Image: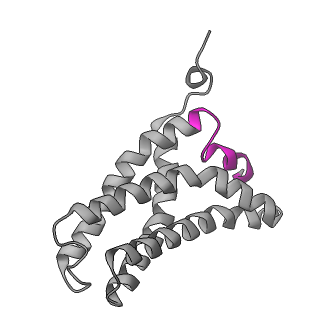
Amino acid sequence: MTSAAARNPVDWPTAIQATLHCLTGCAIGEVLGMVIGTGLGWSDGQTIVLAVVLAFLFGYALTMRPLLRSRLAFGVAVKLALAADTVSIAVMEIVDNLVMLYVPGAMDAGLANWVFWAALAFALGVAFVVALPVNRWLISRGRGHAVVHSHHE
């Protein structure tokens, strides 16, 4: 008996492309949330909540855009985006926010301090590395970004 991965092999470039797509939405939302929360002097918790919400919104929006352009119904596009991105965005958000919390001084550095920006870039890089094998595993089982690939062609 063959495994699901053997029947549906996924190469690393496909997983990298899917993870970069997810990282783009996460990074837009995460950076925007961190900038707004830090700029307004919000607590770490408030800033992280805003960053996570925006990361999910931008991540889903980037997935839905080509689906809606291909004239898919809005409800169908929402369901596909949720199926394609939820696990990947969740993994990225957990990892990058934990990194931001554990880098000494990152959350308190302020927008004009290089520590804030270096920590944020590092956190997103770590999130990419952690999410990559997760996305590869999901795609190999017909989940994650695999559910939207047929709509992009």
Horizontal side, residue 128 vs residue 140: left or right: left
| Res 28 visible | no
> Which colour scheme appears in the figure?
one colour
Which portion, as a residue range, is magenta? 139-152
* Residue 120 placement: quadrant: bottom left
Using the rendered image of the protein, determine whether residue 73 is visible from the camera's viewpoint.
yes
Q: Is residue 147 magenta?
A: yes
Q: Residue at x 51, y 51 (%)?
A: 88
Position of the N terminus by quadrant: top right
Residue 20 in picture, x, y percent from top left: 46, 55
Q: Is residue 123 above or below residue 12?
A: below
Q: Main secondary structure of the magenta part?
A: helix
Q: Is residue 102 left or right of residue 6?
A: left
State the image coordinates of residue 22 (x, y, percent, origin top left).
51, 57
Q: In this image, 84 relative to 114: left or right?
A: right
**Is residue 74 shown in magenta?**
no
Q: Residue furthest top?
A: 1
Q: Which residue: 23% across, 84% down?
A: 110
Q: Quadrant of residue 34?
A: bottom left
Q: Nearer the viewer, residue 39 or 61?
A: 39
Q: Which percent across, then down, holds residue 95?
A: 36, 55
Q: Residue at x 54, y 49 (%)?
A: 87
In the rendered image of this protein, does residue 51 appear above or below residue 23? below
Q: Tell me which residue sits at (20%, 79%) in the image.
A: 109
